[in-house]
Amino acid sequence: METIGKTTRYRWEDMPREEVTDLLGRRLITGERIMLAQVYLDKGCVVPRHRHENEQVTYILKGALKFWVGEEQTVVVVSAGEVLHIPSNVPHKALALEDTLDVDIFAPPRQDWLDKTDDYLRNPDPDEED
């Protein structure tokens, strides 16, 4: 990380990688009103159904994720080079169809990720949605 006036330059390899589960890791860069995350999902990794106030944009760099989106759980597969926008408070779930690297952008930043209180990822409960 390098501060240049009011700006900051980051290198992903310098950012700490958090191993959230055996199949999911991430690196975070956070600004005042936005968060950028590199997310590493091994094939078979499930991100349980959840929703959050944060608007989300997911850009798949490598691999593919199968999403179930909305109350109707519409299925969409997002592959390398594709982007999925998830509006605020829309329920969603994901499955890594292969080893996947994505970049997630959240506005505002995910406080639960920063505080490590994202229990839906760390200790999933199949009966809970949020």
Image: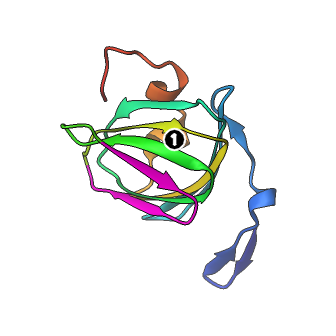
Side of 3 where 50 appears, left or right: left
**Which quadrant of the rendered structure holds the N terminus?**
bottom right
For image coordinates 58% across by 60% down, the residue present is: 80
Side of 40 where 13 appears, left or right: right
Q: Position of residue 98 (x, y in %)?
A: 63, 41
Report the predominant secondary structure element of the magenta stretch: strand
Which residue is under mark 1?
113
Closer to the camera in the image, 2 or 107: 107
**Which quadrant of the rendered structure holds the C terminus?**
top left
Closer to the camera in the image, 126 or 88: 126
> Does residue 126 sit above or below 1 in this rendering?
above
Tell which residue pokes out farthest to the right in this image.
13
> Does residue 117 sit above or below 86 in this rendering?
above
Closer to the camera in the image, 103 or 35: 103
Q: Secondary structure at mark 1?
A: helix
Q: Position of residue 101 (x, y in %)?
A: 64, 51
Side of 16 where 44 appears, left or right: left
Q: Is residue 80 magenta?
A: yes
Q: Image quadrant of residue 22?
A: top right
Tell me the kind of residue under disc 1: Trp
Badge 1 local density, few (<14 within 10 Å), some, or many (20+)?
some
Q: Which residues are magenta?
A: 75-88
Q: Position of residue 88 (x, y in %)?
A: 27, 52
For image coordinates 31% across by 19% down, the residue present is: 128
Closer to the camera in the image, 14 or 8: 14
